[in-house]
Amino acid sequence: MIVTNAAERLSRAEDQKNEMLAAVGDLSKINLLHNRVLVGIYIEPEMTKGGIILSAGRVKESVWQGSVGLVLKKGNTAFKDEPESGTYFHGQDAQIGEWVVFRPGDARRVQINGVDCRMVEDSLLDMVVDDPNIITHR
């Protein structure tokens, strides 16, 4: 089967983190404003650990309903305490290259070099996880 887009490539990647970083490319000319965090959407693998090949619809579902993403870039005020608004992070932060969990409805969709991404406000990120596969919705 010919790979037709970035989401399909990511679903087949041995190392989705490195594949995503390579596909997104240089982000130095992108300046996220305020407290926004740019995350690349984790695409559920095409094949389960048991060898079952998932449908193309599952890839599309990951694009639209994915709730796990790789932190690619942060705005200058992301994870900074804001006493005037009562927002305090107590030292918590999500670093570039970490997987985070968020509610899909809290994020704005954007594609960067064909890779599906979301822009999420820092305070709307819910968790940092080592392995995106532990977050399931089945």
Image (tube, grey):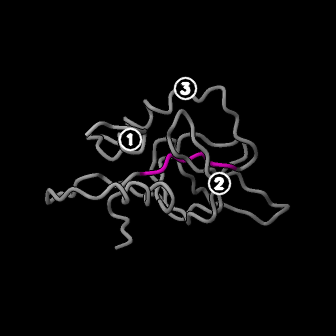
Q: Which residue is mark 2?
A: 108
The picture places residue 14, in percent across and down from the top left corner, at 26, 41
The picture places residue 76, in percent across and down from the top left corner, at 71, 41
Q: Which residue is mark 1?
A: 17
Disc with the residue nearer the chain's start (3 vs 2) = 3
Q: Amino acid at mark 3?
A: Asp
Up-down: is 96 above or below 99? above
Which contiguous range is marked in magenta? 36-42
Up-down: is 25 above or below 125? above
Q: Amino acid at mark 2?
A: Arg
Give the farthest residue toward the right. 84
The picture places residue 36, in percent across and down from the top left corner, at 68, 49
Disc with the residue nearer the chain's start (3 vs 1) = 1
Are discs 3 and 2 less than 8 Å apart at CB? Answer: no
Mark pair 1, 2: CA separation? 21 Å
Residue 40 is covered by the magenta coloring: yes
Q: Amino acid at mark 1?
A: Lys
Q: Which residue is mark 3?
A: 26
Residue 69 is covered by the magenta coloring: no
- Count numbered badges in the picture: 3
Discs 3/2, front: 2
Disc with the residue nearer the chain's start (1 vs 2) = 1
